[in-house]
Image (cartoon, rainbow, N blue to C red):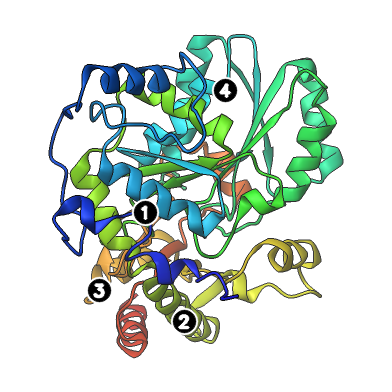
Amino acid sequence: MSKKPQPESLMMSHGYKPELSEGAIKPPIFQTSTFTFKTAEEGKAFFEVAYGLREQSEGEEQGLIYSRINNPNLEILEDRLTLWDEAEECAVFESGMSAISTVFLEFLKPGDLLLVSAPLYGGSDHFVSKILPTFGIHTAAFHVGQSQREIMDIVEASGMADRLAMIHIETPANPTNDLIDIAGCRAVADHFSTPEKRVRLAVDNTYLGPLWQHPLKHGADLVIYSATKYIGGHSDVIAGACLGSKPLIKRVKVLRTFLGNMAGPWTGWLLMRSLETLKARMDLQATNAERVAEMLNNHPKVGRVYYLGNLTEQKDPDQYRIREEQCLSNGAMLSFDIDGGEPAAFRFLNALRLIKLAVSLGSTESLAEHPATMTHADVDEAVKANLNITASMLRLSVGVENWRDLCDDIEQALAKA
Ligand SMILES: *Cc1c(COP(=O)(O)O)cnc(C)c1O
Protein backbone atom coordinates (compact mmCIF):
# COMPACT_ATOMS: atom_id res chain seq x y z
CA MET A 1 0.00 0.00 0.00
CA SER A 2 1.37 3.40 -0.90
CA LYS A 3 1.22 6.22 1.63
CA LYS A 4 -1.17 9.13 1.10
CA PRO A 5 0.81 12.02 -0.43
CA GLN A 6 1.37 15.16 1.63
CA PRO A 7 -0.83 18.18 0.76
CA GLU A 8 2.06 20.03 -0.95
CA SER A 9 2.35 17.13 -3.39
CA LEU A 10 -1.30 17.43 -4.35
CA MET A 11 -1.56 21.21 -4.83
CA MET A 12 -0.86 20.94 -8.58
CA SER A 13 -3.46 18.28 -9.37
CA HIS A 14 -6.03 17.53 -6.68
CA GLY A 15 -9.65 17.92 -7.72
CA TYR A 16 -8.94 18.74 -11.38
CA LYS A 17 -9.63 16.45 -14.34
CA PRO A 18 -7.67 17.62 -17.44
CA GLU A 19 -9.88 15.48 -19.70
CA LEU A 20 -12.80 17.79 -18.90
CA SER A 21 -10.77 20.80 -20.15
CA GLU A 22 -9.21 19.75 -23.47
CA GLY A 23 -6.28 18.18 -21.60
CA ALA A 24 -5.07 21.55 -20.28
CA ILE A 25 -2.45 20.88 -17.59
CA LYS A 26 -3.76 23.80 -15.55
CA PRO A 27 -7.41 24.54 -14.83
CA PRO A 28 -8.60 27.24 -17.24
CA ILE A 29 -10.36 30.28 -15.78
CA PHE A 30 -14.05 29.46 -16.04
CA GLN A 31 -15.04 33.05 -16.77
CA THR A 32 -18.72 32.30 -17.13
CA SER A 33 -21.81 33.32 -15.23
CA THR A 34 -23.99 30.36 -16.17
CA PHE A 35 -23.65 26.73 -17.33
CA THR A 36 -25.66 24.85 -19.94
CA PHE A 37 -27.62 21.77 -18.88
CA LYS A 38 -27.48 18.75 -21.21
CA THR A 39 -31.22 18.15 -20.72
CA ALA A 40 -34.13 19.67 -18.83
CA GLU A 41 -34.11 16.62 -16.55
CA GLU A 42 -30.48 17.33 -15.66
CA GLY A 43 -31.27 20.97 -14.85
CA LYS A 44 -34.10 19.84 -12.58
CA ALA A 45 -31.82 17.36 -10.79
CA PHE A 46 -29.08 19.98 -10.25
CA PHE A 47 -31.56 22.41 -8.67
CA GLU A 48 -33.03 19.72 -6.43
CA VAL A 49 -29.58 19.12 -4.96
CA ALA A 50 -28.57 22.80 -4.82
CA TYR A 51 -31.71 23.80 -2.96
CA GLY A 52 -31.76 20.71 -0.73
CA LEU A 53 -35.15 19.61 -2.09
CA ARG A 54 -34.06 15.96 -1.81
CA GLU A 55 -31.13 13.94 -0.48
CA GLN A 56 -28.15 13.56 -2.82
CA SER A 57 -27.96 9.99 -4.08
CA GLU A 58 -24.79 7.92 -3.59
CA GLY A 59 -21.91 9.45 -5.62
CA GLU A 60 -24.08 12.24 -7.07
CA GLU A 61 -22.16 15.51 -7.33
CA GLN A 62 -23.61 18.97 -7.30
CA GLY A 63 -23.90 19.95 -10.98
CA LEU A 64 -22.76 23.32 -12.29
CA ILE A 65 -25.64 25.81 -12.45
CA TYR A 66 -24.65 29.46 -12.02
CA SER A 67 -21.41 31.02 -10.73
CA ARG A 68 -23.01 32.51 -7.61
CA ILE A 69 -23.81 28.92 -6.54
CA ASN A 70 -20.71 27.11 -7.83
CA ASN A 71 -17.92 27.39 -10.40
CA PRO A 72 -15.08 24.94 -11.20
CA ASN A 73 -12.36 27.40 -10.12
CA LEU A 74 -13.97 27.64 -6.69
CA GLU A 75 -14.73 23.94 -6.35
CA ILE A 76 -11.18 22.83 -7.19
CA LEU A 77 -9.72 25.46 -4.86
CA GLU A 78 -12.06 24.39 -2.05
CA ASP A 79 -11.07 20.73 -2.50
CA ARG A 80 -7.38 21.64 -2.31
CA LEU A 81 -7.78 23.84 0.76
CA THR A 82 -9.45 21.02 2.73
CA LEU A 83 -6.24 18.97 2.52
CA TRP A 84 -4.13 21.19 4.82
CA ASP A 85 -6.66 21.29 7.67
CA GLU A 86 -8.02 17.79 6.92
CA ALA A 87 -11.48 19.38 6.81
CA GLU A 88 -14.52 17.75 5.24
CA GLU A 89 -15.47 20.84 3.30
CA CYS A 90 -14.50 24.40 2.48
CA ALA A 91 -16.23 27.57 1.26
CA VAL A 92 -14.22 30.37 -0.36
CA PHE A 93 -15.18 34.02 -0.30
CA GLU A 94 -14.22 37.27 -1.97
CA SER A 95 -12.54 38.43 1.29
CA GLY A 96 -11.58 37.26 4.76
CA MET A 97 -14.18 39.65 6.18
CA SER A 98 -16.95 38.09 4.09
CA ALA A 99 -15.97 34.62 5.43
CA ILE A 100 -16.06 35.94 9.01
CA SER A 101 -19.28 37.96 8.67
CA THR A 102 -21.10 35.13 6.88
CA VAL A 103 -20.17 32.69 9.67
CA PHE A 104 -21.44 35.14 12.31
CA LEU A 105 -24.69 35.80 10.47
CA GLU A 106 -25.34 32.09 9.89
CA PHE A 107 -24.68 30.84 13.42
CA LEU A 108 -25.84 33.76 15.59
CA LYS A 109 -29.47 34.75 16.05
CA PRO A 110 -31.07 37.74 17.86
CA GLY A 111 -30.63 37.37 21.62
CA ASP A 112 -27.56 35.13 21.31
CA LEU A 113 -24.25 35.74 23.09
CA LEU A 114 -20.95 35.63 21.23
CA LEU A 115 -17.71 35.27 23.20
CA VAL A 116 -14.55 36.60 21.51
CA SER A 117 -10.88 36.80 22.35
CA ALA A 118 -9.25 40.25 22.49
CA PRO A 119 -7.55 41.73 20.59
CA LEU A 120 -9.36 40.77 17.39
CA TYR A 121 -8.47 41.82 13.85
CA GLY A 122 -9.81 45.40 13.42
CA GLY A 123 -12.43 44.47 10.81
CA SER A 124 -13.74 41.57 12.91
CA ASP A 125 -13.77 43.81 15.97
CA HIS A 126 -15.83 46.42 14.10
CA PHE A 127 -18.33 43.82 12.89
CA VAL A 128 -18.70 42.35 16.38
CA SER A 129 -18.93 45.63 18.30
CA LYS A 130 -20.80 47.84 15.79
CA ILE A 131 -22.83 45.64 13.42
CA LEU A 132 -23.86 42.52 15.36
CA PRO A 133 -25.55 44.60 18.13
CA THR A 134 -27.93 46.04 15.50
CA PHE A 135 -29.16 42.45 15.00
CA GLY A 136 -29.65 42.03 18.77
CA ILE A 137 -26.53 39.89 19.20
CA HIS A 138 -24.57 40.41 22.43
CA THR A 139 -20.83 40.06 22.90
CA ALA A 140 -18.50 39.27 25.79
CA ALA A 141 -14.70 39.27 25.50
CA PHE A 142 -11.78 37.66 27.28
CA HIS A 143 -8.11 38.52 27.04
CA VAL A 144 -5.08 36.41 26.32
CA GLY A 145 -3.66 35.00 29.54
CA GLN A 146 -7.02 34.49 31.24
CA SER A 147 -7.62 31.01 32.63
CA GLN A 148 -10.46 28.69 31.64
CA ARG A 149 -12.12 29.45 34.99
CA GLU A 150 -11.87 33.22 34.40
CA ILE A 151 -13.31 32.84 30.89
CA MET A 152 -16.26 30.84 32.27
CA ASP A 153 -16.79 33.53 34.92
CA ILE A 154 -16.98 36.19 32.18
CA VAL A 155 -19.72 34.19 30.43
CA GLU A 156 -21.62 33.68 33.72
CA ALA A 157 -21.25 37.36 34.64
CA SER A 158 -22.91 38.38 31.34
CA GLY A 159 -26.15 36.92 32.66
CA MET A 160 -26.64 35.28 29.25
CA ALA A 161 -24.70 32.03 29.71
CA ASP A 162 -27.66 30.01 28.46
CA ARG A 163 -27.63 32.05 25.23
CA LEU A 164 -23.93 31.51 24.46
CA ALA A 165 -23.95 30.32 20.82
CA MET A 166 -20.39 30.77 19.64
CA ILE A 167 -16.80 31.42 20.73
CA HIS A 168 -14.63 33.16 18.12
CA ILE A 169 -10.89 33.41 18.73
CA GLU A 170 -7.75 34.58 16.98
CA THR A 171 -4.48 32.92 17.93
CA PRO A 172 -1.68 34.00 17.87
CA ALA A 173 -3.05 37.46 18.65
CA ASN A 174 -2.01 40.33 16.42
CA PRO A 175 0.46 42.07 16.95
CA THR A 176 1.82 40.51 20.17
CA ASN A 177 1.81 36.81 19.23
CA ASP A 178 0.04 35.94 22.49
CA LEU A 179 -1.40 32.43 22.25
CA ILE A 180 -4.88 31.22 23.16
CA ASP A 181 -5.49 27.60 24.05
CA ILE A 182 -7.85 26.19 21.39
CA ALA A 183 -8.55 22.97 23.32
CA GLY A 184 -9.20 25.09 26.42
CA CYS A 185 -11.80 27.11 24.49
CA ARG A 186 -13.39 23.83 23.35
CA ALA A 187 -13.72 22.89 27.02
CA VAL A 188 -15.42 26.23 27.74
CA ALA A 189 -17.74 25.72 24.76
CA ASP A 190 -18.59 22.19 25.97
CA HIS A 191 -19.24 23.49 29.48
CA PHE A 192 -21.99 25.79 28.13
CA SER A 193 -23.34 23.32 25.56
CA THR A 194 -26.54 21.35 26.11
CA PRO A 195 -27.85 18.28 24.29
CA GLU A 196 -30.00 20.64 22.18
CA LYS A 197 -27.40 23.32 21.57
CA ARG A 198 -23.71 22.84 20.78
CA VAL A 199 -21.72 26.02 21.44
CA ARG A 200 -19.61 26.42 18.29
CA LEU A 201 -15.93 27.31 18.33
CA ALA A 202 -14.55 29.29 15.38
CA VAL A 203 -10.83 30.04 15.01
CA ASP A 204 -9.40 32.74 12.74
CA ASN A 205 -6.27 30.86 11.66
CA THR A 206 -4.86 33.55 9.34
CA TYR A 207 -1.60 34.02 11.28
CA LEU A 208 -0.34 30.40 11.34
CA GLY A 209 -2.51 28.55 8.89
CA PRO A 210 -3.02 26.54 6.94
CA LEU A 211 0.44 24.99 7.48
CA TRP A 212 1.40 25.64 11.07
CA GLN A 213 -1.79 25.27 13.11
CA HIS A 214 -4.78 23.00 12.59
CA PRO A 215 -7.58 24.20 14.89
CA LEU A 216 -10.07 21.48 13.82
CA LYS A 217 -7.73 18.92 15.43
CA HIS A 218 -7.95 20.78 18.74
CA GLY A 219 -11.73 20.93 18.87
CA ALA A 220 -12.68 23.89 16.67
CA ASP A 221 -15.88 23.54 14.61
CA LEU A 222 -14.88 26.13 12.04
CA VAL A 223 -11.55 27.48 10.83
CA ILE A 224 -11.55 30.80 9.02
CA TYR A 225 -8.91 32.49 6.85
CA SER A 226 -8.13 35.76 5.30
CA ALA A 227 -6.74 34.07 2.17
CA THR A 228 -5.39 37.52 1.29
CA LYS A 229 -2.45 36.70 3.58
CA TYR A 230 -0.37 33.46 3.43
CA ILE A 231 -2.74 31.51 1.18
CA GLY A 232 -2.72 34.19 -1.56
CA GLY A 233 0.75 35.18 -0.45
CA HIS A 234 1.62 37.75 -3.16
CA SER A 235 -0.28 40.89 -2.03
CA ASP A 236 -2.30 40.80 -5.24
CA VAL A 237 -5.71 39.41 -4.25
CA ILE A 238 -8.31 39.76 -1.47
CA ALA A 239 -10.03 36.49 -0.52
CA GLY A 240 -11.26 34.38 2.37
CA ALA A 241 -12.14 30.81 3.32
CA CYS A 242 -14.04 28.87 5.95
CA LEU A 243 -13.60 25.13 6.64
CA GLY A 244 -15.32 22.53 8.78
CA SER A 245 -17.71 19.59 8.69
CA LYS A 246 -20.03 19.00 5.72
CA PRO A 247 -23.23 19.99 7.55
CA LEU A 248 -21.77 23.27 8.87
CA ILE A 249 -20.14 24.34 5.59
CA LYS A 250 -23.33 23.47 3.72
CA ARG A 251 -25.13 26.04 5.88
CA VAL A 252 -22.35 28.58 5.28
CA LYS A 253 -22.59 27.99 1.51
CA VAL A 254 -26.36 28.48 1.43
CA LEU A 255 -26.01 31.88 3.12
CA ARG A 256 -23.08 32.68 0.80
CA THR A 257 -25.31 32.00 -2.20
CA PHE A 258 -27.88 34.50 -0.98
CA LEU A 259 -25.44 37.14 0.24
CA GLY A 260 -23.64 36.65 -3.08
CA ASN A 261 -20.17 37.02 -1.52
CA MET A 262 -18.52 33.96 -3.09
CA ALA A 263 -15.12 34.42 -4.70
CA GLY A 264 -15.08 35.02 -8.46
CA PRO A 265 -13.36 32.61 -10.89
CA TRP A 266 -10.31 34.84 -11.31
CA THR A 267 -9.78 34.98 -7.52
CA GLY A 268 -10.16 31.20 -7.43
CA TRP A 269 -7.60 30.74 -10.18
CA LEU A 270 -5.08 33.08 -8.52
CA LEU A 271 -5.38 31.23 -5.21
CA MET A 272 -4.87 27.86 -6.91
CA ARG A 273 -1.69 29.21 -8.42
CA SER A 274 -0.61 30.44 -4.98
CA LEU A 275 -1.31 27.09 -3.31
CA GLU A 276 1.29 25.35 -5.49
CA THR A 277 4.08 27.25 -3.69
CA LEU A 278 2.42 27.64 -0.27
CA LYS A 279 4.61 25.14 1.56
CA ALA A 280 7.85 26.36 -0.04
CA ARG A 281 7.02 30.00 0.66
CA MET A 282 5.90 29.51 4.24
CA ASP A 283 8.86 27.28 5.15
CA LEU A 284 11.29 29.89 3.85
CA GLN A 285 9.41 32.72 5.57
CA ALA A 286 9.59 30.87 8.91
CA THR A 287 13.35 30.25 8.52
CA ASN A 288 13.92 33.89 7.60
CA ALA A 289 11.86 35.03 10.61
CA GLU A 290 14.04 32.92 12.90
CA ARG A 291 17.17 34.66 11.59
CA VAL A 292 15.60 38.11 11.89
CA ALA A 293 14.45 37.35 15.46
CA GLU A 294 17.96 36.20 16.42
CA MET A 295 19.40 39.48 15.16
CA LEU A 296 16.74 41.58 16.94
CA ASN A 297 17.19 39.63 20.21
CA ASN A 298 20.82 40.75 20.30
CA HIS A 299 20.43 44.33 19.12
CA PRO A 300 21.14 47.10 21.68
CA LYS A 301 18.35 49.42 20.40
CA VAL A 302 15.71 46.70 20.61
CA GLY A 303 13.74 45.88 23.76
CA ARG A 304 11.31 43.00 23.89
CA VAL A 305 10.90 40.82 20.79
CA TYR A 306 7.43 39.26 20.43
CA TYR A 307 8.23 36.04 18.60
CA LEU A 308 6.89 32.54 19.32
CA GLY A 309 10.42 31.14 19.15
CA ASN A 310 11.38 33.29 22.17
CA LEU A 311 8.96 31.56 24.56
CA THR A 312 10.69 29.57 27.30
CA GLU A 313 9.32 27.00 29.71
CA GLN A 314 10.85 28.87 32.67
CA LYS A 315 9.66 32.40 31.87
CA ASP A 316 6.34 31.75 30.10
CA PRO A 317 5.22 28.25 31.18
CA ASP A 318 1.60 28.63 30.05
CA GLN A 319 2.33 30.22 26.64
CA TYR A 320 5.12 27.69 26.10
CA ARG A 321 2.74 24.78 26.81
CA ILE A 322 0.15 26.12 24.34
CA ARG A 323 2.81 26.57 21.66
CA GLU A 324 4.03 23.00 22.15
CA GLU A 325 0.47 21.67 21.96
CA GLN A 326 -0.96 23.53 18.99
CA CYS A 327 1.71 25.30 16.90
CA LEU A 328 3.79 23.44 14.34
CA SER A 329 6.13 26.40 13.71
CA ASN A 330 7.04 29.74 15.26
CA GLY A 331 5.58 31.47 12.19
CA ALA A 332 6.88 34.43 10.24
CA MET A 333 5.24 37.33 12.09
CA LEU A 334 7.08 39.18 14.83
CA SER A 335 6.94 42.46 16.68
CA PHE A 336 9.56 44.30 18.69
CA ASP A 337 9.92 47.36 20.90
CA ILE A 338 12.41 49.96 19.75
CA ASP A 339 14.12 52.37 22.18
CA GLY A 340 12.87 55.95 21.73
CA GLY A 341 9.09 55.60 21.22
CA GLU A 342 7.19 56.87 18.18
CA PRO A 343 9.91 59.19 16.83
CA ALA A 344 12.46 56.36 16.75
CA ALA A 345 9.88 53.90 15.38
CA PHE A 346 9.01 56.31 12.54
CA ARG A 347 12.70 57.02 11.76
CA PHE A 348 13.18 53.25 11.54
CA LEU A 349 10.22 52.75 9.17
CA ASN A 350 11.24 55.70 6.99
CA ALA A 351 14.81 54.39 6.71
CA LEU A 352 13.90 50.88 5.50
CA ARG A 353 14.90 50.24 1.88
CA LEU A 354 14.18 46.61 1.00
CA ILE A 355 11.36 46.06 3.49
CA LYS A 356 8.18 47.91 2.50
CA LEU A 357 6.15 50.11 4.83
CA ALA A 358 2.63 48.65 4.57
CA VAL A 359 -0.02 46.81 6.56
CA SER A 360 -1.18 43.26 5.66
CA LEU A 361 1.01 40.20 6.12
CA GLY A 362 2.02 36.77 4.87
CA SER A 363 3.21 37.87 1.46
CA THR A 364 6.43 37.12 -0.44
CA GLU A 365 7.75 40.63 0.26
CA SER A 366 8.62 41.65 3.83
CA LEU A 367 6.42 44.36 5.35
CA ALA A 368 6.82 46.62 8.38
CA GLU A 369 4.25 48.79 10.18
CA HIS A 370 3.55 50.66 13.43
CA PRO A 371 0.52 48.98 15.12
CA ALA A 372 -0.26 51.81 17.59
CA THR A 373 -0.90 54.36 14.82
CA MET A 374 -1.79 52.03 11.94
CA THR A 375 -3.45 48.57 12.27
CA HIS A 376 -4.48 49.17 15.90
CA ALA A 377 -5.06 52.95 15.70
CA ASP A 378 -8.68 52.79 16.87
CA VAL A 379 -8.10 50.35 19.74
CA ASP A 380 -8.95 51.99 23.08
CA GLU A 381 -5.80 53.54 24.69
CA ALA A 382 -6.26 51.60 27.94
CA VAL A 383 -6.66 48.33 26.04
CA LYS A 384 -3.57 49.14 23.94
CA ALA A 385 -1.50 49.76 27.07
CA ASN A 386 -2.81 46.58 28.64
CA LEU A 387 -1.82 44.58 25.55
CA ASN A 388 1.66 46.19 25.28
CA ILE A 389 0.76 47.90 22.00
CA THR A 390 2.89 50.96 22.75
CA ALA A 391 4.34 53.72 20.55
CA SER A 392 7.62 51.76 20.62
CA MET A 393 6.21 48.65 18.96
CA LEU A 394 6.91 47.72 15.34
CA ARG A 395 5.46 44.74 13.49
CA LEU A 396 7.24 42.76 10.79
CA SER A 397 5.83 40.27 8.31
CA VAL A 398 8.85 38.35 7.07
CA GLY A 399 8.93 37.41 3.38
CA VAL A 400 11.04 35.20 1.12
CA GLU A 401 13.99 37.55 0.45
CA ASN A 402 17.53 36.49 1.32
CA TRP A 403 17.67 36.63 5.15
CA ARG A 404 21.03 38.43 5.16
CA ASP A 405 19.56 41.23 3.05
CA LEU A 406 16.62 41.49 5.46
CA CYS A 407 18.93 41.64 8.50
CA ASP A 408 21.15 44.23 6.76
CA ASP A 409 18.14 46.40 5.96
CA ILE A 410 16.84 46.23 9.54
CA GLU A 411 20.30 46.95 10.97
CA GLN A 412 20.86 50.01 8.79
CA ALA A 413 17.39 51.33 9.64
CA LEU A 414 18.00 50.72 13.36
CA ALA A 415 21.23 52.68 13.08
CA LYS A 416 19.21 55.67 11.77
CA ALA A 417 16.47 55.31 14.41
C1 LIG B 1 -6.54 40.50 7.11
C2 LIG B 1 -7.24 39.75 8.17
C3 LIG B 1 -8.63 39.57 8.15
C4 LIG B 1 -9.52 40.20 7.07
O1 LIG B 1 -9.29 39.64 5.83
P1 LIG B 1 -9.57 40.41 4.43
O2 LIG B 1 -9.12 39.41 3.43
O3 LIG B 1 -8.77 41.66 4.45
O4 LIG B 1 -11.02 40.68 4.38
C5 LIG B 1 -9.22 38.82 9.15
N1 LIG B 1 -8.48 38.27 10.15
C6 LIG B 1 -7.15 38.43 10.22
C7 LIG B 1 -6.39 37.82 11.33
C8 LIG B 1 -6.49 39.18 9.25
O5 LIG B 1 -5.16 39.35 9.33
Mark toward the viewer: 4 or 3? 4
Residue at 22% from the left image edge and 38% from the top image edge: 264
Give SS at disc 3: helix
Relative height, residue 262 to residue 284 (above, below): above
Which residue position is annotated with label 1?
15
- In this view, the residue in front, 24 or 262, is 24
- Amino acid on which disc 3 is placed: Ala
Quadrant of res 25 = bottom left
Residue at 20% from the left image edge and 61% from the top image edge: 26
Mark toward the viewer: 4 or 1? 1
Quadrant of res 2 = bottom right
Expressed as whole percent of the image width and height from the top left, the position of residue 381 reads: 53, 40
Give SS at disc 4: helix
Contact between marks 3 and 2 (CB within 8 A): the answer is no
Q: Is residue 152 left or right of residue 43?
A: right
Quadrant location, the C terminus: bottom left
Contact between marks 4 and 3 (CB within 8 A): the answer is no
How far apart are labels 3 and 1 at the CA level? 46 Å
- Amino acid on which disc 4 is placed: Phe
Answer with mark 4 or mark 2, whichever residue precedes in sequence: 4
Contact between marks 4 and 2 (CB within 8 A): the answer is no
Which residue position is annotated with label 4?
107
Which residue position is annotated with label 2?
287
Which residue position is annotated with label 3?
351
Give SS at disc 2: helix
How far apart are labels 4 and 3 at the CA level? 46 Å
Relative height, residue 224 to residue 153 (above, below): below
Quadrant of res 155 = top right
Give SS at disc 1: loop
- Amino acid on which disc 2 is placed: Thr
Expressed as whole percent of the image width and height from the top left, the position of residue 378 reads: 43, 37
